[in-house]
Image (cartoon, rainbow, N blue to C red):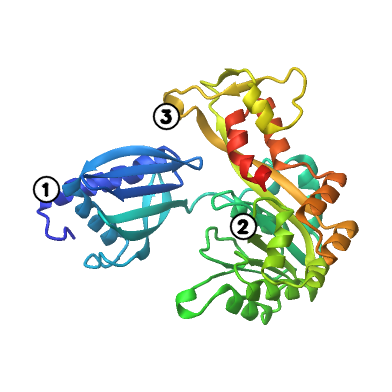
């Protein structure tokens, strides 16, 4: 087990690795990075979407730490020149924690990235996700459609899977055959058929989706639409009587239509299939113990480009032990719902620009993520810096 180390060193390395994992869980980290440098190895934790520094270890301990992690994940400890993927499990505070990890050779040594998944976490209901009531009402109506395509968009780690599984839980009943195809399966739900994509053996999203359609499904969840083949199969399925959920990586909800255009999906298929798109982000919540009042600056007002309500007060992060001196603790969601109405379908059919689609959606009541985020800041839940960080990309698009 020790890879040539004596027992005392092996015990020390084991304690270090366990300590890194436990610290990650204590910090509520989603990911842990062990990075190889020229003279040392550093640990960083992704907390609330941001990487924070952990401890630094002497260079001579680095290889032993990586070997220990590889042994736990049953990876090849002799292979250091090629990337490897694996997983391990351990018990922490009575909970089973799954860790999905990957190694990557760099010029200074192997880097390890670990994603922490709590196997015992309970599925949340749609009403518990913090979705704006008006958006929640429209989204809830859309998922009750007998057929069609519903997309959830956002960057990695924005909570798309949590939202989709909350939707599936609402629809889960003995009268429906629900099947998912994911990479990887992150939640396990009773009475739902869940398949894990395995591209190395040819089980891609497209191949798996074709197989699912031969299984008499009512509702299908495809983890992600990554290529034109998967897109066309998903849209065809939604047109022929199935309700299909999936995800896309776009800046906002409206841009999803043009993302499908760029994948060479025909406009008539989009107009026939697409019911709506929910875009979402997770923004950091200010620590209630150390947040402090903040005066809106001219720069912020100019960059936000939005009318601020008279008398609106704002807060900024402070820093205390409770939040590890970050000023933030936890995250809160912001959403944007793009509903495909008759007017929107006409615009999609003639491949209207994103600006035209956005204008039509705004006329129908769409509230942008930036405005939603600004409302959260005015309520004292987050900072204006966080609003700008999360929505700058959308604004530029």
- Residue tagged 1: 8
Q: Secondary structure at mark 1?
A: helix
The disc, 3 or 2, on the residue closer to the chain's N-terminal end is: 2
Residue at 60% in and 40% down = 390
Q: What element does badge 3 sit on? A: loop
**Quarter where residue 215 is shown:** bottom right
Q: Nearer the viewer, mark 1 or mark 2?
A: 2
Rendered image quadrant of residue 294: top right
Q: Quadrant of residue 263?
A: bottom right
Instruction: Give the alpha-carbon distance from disc 3 to disc 2, as whole Å.
Output: 31 Å
Give how far across and how far down residue 136 sits, in percent: 76, 46
The residue where tag 3 is placed is: 324
Badge number at residue 54? none
* Residue that label 2 marks: 249
In the displayed structure, does residue 292 sit left or right of residue 91? right
Q: In the image shown, does 10 or 60 lie closer to the viewer? A: 60
Say whether residue 248 is left or right of residue 44. Answer: right
Q: Residues within 10 Å of mark 2 (few under 14, many from 20)?
A: some
Instruction: Name the foreground residue: 356 vs 271.
Output: 356
Task: Examine the rendered structure and indicate whether residue 352 appears above or below residue 370.
Answer: below
In the image, residue 302 above or below residue 342: above
């Amino acid at each position: 087990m020790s890879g040539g180390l004596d027992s005392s060193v092996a015990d020390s390395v084991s304690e270090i690795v366990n300590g890194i994992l436990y610290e990650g869980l204590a910090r509520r980290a989603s990911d842990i990075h062990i990075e190889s440098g020229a003279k040392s190895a550093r640990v960083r934790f992704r907390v609330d979407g941001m990487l924070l520094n952990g401890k630094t270890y002497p260079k001579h301990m680095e290889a032993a730490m990586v070997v220990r992690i590889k042994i736990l994940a049953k990876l090849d400890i002799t292979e250091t020149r090629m990337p490897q993927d694996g997983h391990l499990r351990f018990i922490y505070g009575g909970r089973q924690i799954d860790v999905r990890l990957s190694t990557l050779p760099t010029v200074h040594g192997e880097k390890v990235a670990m994603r922490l998944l709590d196997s015992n976490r309970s599925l949340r209901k749609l009403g518990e996700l913090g979705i704006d009531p008006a958006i929640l009402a429209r989204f809830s109506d859309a998922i009750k459609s007998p057929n069609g395509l519903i997309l959830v968009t956002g960057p990695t780690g924005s909570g798309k899977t949590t939202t989709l599984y909350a939707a599936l839980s609402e629809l889960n009943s003995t009268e429906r055959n629900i099947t998912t195809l994911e990479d990887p399966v992150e939640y396990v739900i009773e009475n739902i058929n869940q398949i894990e994509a395995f591209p190395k053996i040819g089980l891609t999203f497209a191949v798996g989706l074709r197989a699912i359609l031969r299984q008499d499904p009512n509702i299908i969840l495809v983890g992600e639409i990554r290529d034109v083949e998967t897109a066309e199969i998903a849209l065809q399925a939604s047109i022929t009587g199935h309700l299909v959920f999936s995800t896309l990586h776009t800046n906002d909800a409206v841009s999803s239509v043009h993302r499908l255009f760029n994948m060479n999906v025909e406009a008539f298929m989009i107009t026939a299939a697409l019911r709506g798109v929910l875009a979402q982000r997770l923004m950091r919540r200010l620590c209630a113990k150390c947040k402090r009042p903040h005066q809106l600056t001219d720069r912020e007002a100019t960059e936000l480009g939005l009318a601020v309500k008279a008398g609106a007060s704002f807060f900024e992060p402070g820093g205390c032990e409770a939040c590890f001196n970050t000023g933030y603790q936890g995250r809160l969601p912001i959403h944007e719902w793009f509903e495909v109405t008759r007017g929107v379908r006409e615009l999609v059919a003639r491949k209207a620009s994103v600006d035209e689609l956005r204008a039509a959606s705004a006329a129908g009541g769409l509230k942008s993520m930036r405005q939603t985020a600004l409302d959260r800041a005015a309520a004292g839940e987050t900072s204006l810096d966080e609003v700008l960080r999360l929505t700058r990309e959308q604004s530029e698009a």
